[in-house]
Amino acid sequence: MFLRRLANAIEGKCQITSDNLPIYKHNVPLFIGSRCDFAQLTKVFATAPVENRYSPPRIIGTEKSVRFGHPDEDHISTSYVERFNLSIRMHSRRLTRLTNAHSKKLEHHAAMMSLFVAWYNYCRPNMALGKGRTPAMAAGLAVGPWSIGDLLGMAAS
């Protein structure tokens, strides 16, 4: 379902990098086809000592595998999506462990996540993009940061 929705959202040609989850190897080309260049990035981990079994293992390298098309080797990376996932987890109590800030209904969870993504992209300036610039401004989708009132007004319409 994710790849079907992604395929519908893509305009033109793009480059996709996934982790080494086997389902992506055949399904990205199947659903998106020649509209993408596709590679997978595999992380190589050091063996963790038993006494540190609750700590994540140390990454000692990566392996890039071109799966479809001609992806630019310099842009085969999962860093952006991993950083966005961290931002979601840090800003949304619903995605942290051992919390009572959960959604009782899937519809409520989906609505909350949609509001978060809209706030993150339209309201919250990202210093990496320049002072006061949001991701939506960098993408040419907005001329300035939205207020919370603007965001809620768009959500209501």
Image (cartoon, helix red, strand yellow):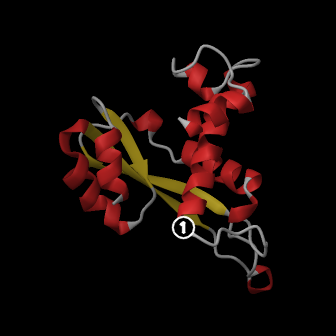
Q: Is residue 114 positioned above or below 104 on the image?
A: above
| Residue at x-position 24% and y-position 46% | 32
Asked whether residue 124 appears in the rendered view, the answer is no
Image quarter where the N terminus lies is: bottom left
Residue receiving disc 1:
106
Q: Is residue 79 positioned above or below 107 on the image?
A: above
Q: Position of residue 10 (x, y in %)?
A: 32, 37
Q: Position of residue 2 (x, y in %)?
A: 37, 57
Q: How dense is the environment of label 1, judged by Cα within 10 Å: few (below 14), some, or many (20 and up)?
A: few
Asked whether residue 153 appears in the rendered view, the answer is yes
**Along the viewing direction, whichever of 106 and 18 lies nearer the viewer:** 106
| Residue at x-position 76% and y-position 67% | 101
Q: Is residue 5 positioned above or below 100 on the image?
A: above
Q: Quadrant of residue 45?
A: bottom right
Q: Position of residue 151 (x, y in %)?
A: 65, 33
Count the marks: how many?
1
In the picture as drawn, the residue positioned furthest to the bottom comes out as 50
**Along the viewing direction, whichever of 65 and 7 lies nearer the viewer:** 7
Q: Quadrant of residue 156?
A: top right
Q: Position of residue 11 (x, y in %)?
A: 30, 31
Amino acid on which disc 1 is placed: Leu
**Along the viewing direction, whichever of 109 and 97 lies nearer the viewer:** 109
Q: Is residue 77 left or right of residue 115?
A: left
| Residue at x-position 65% and y-position 68% | 103
In the picture as drawn, the residue positioned furthest to the front comes out as 157
| Residue at x-position 76% and y-position 18% | 131
In the picture as drawn, the residue positioned furthest to the top comes out as 143
As helix, strand or loop, the secondary structure at mark 1 comes to helix
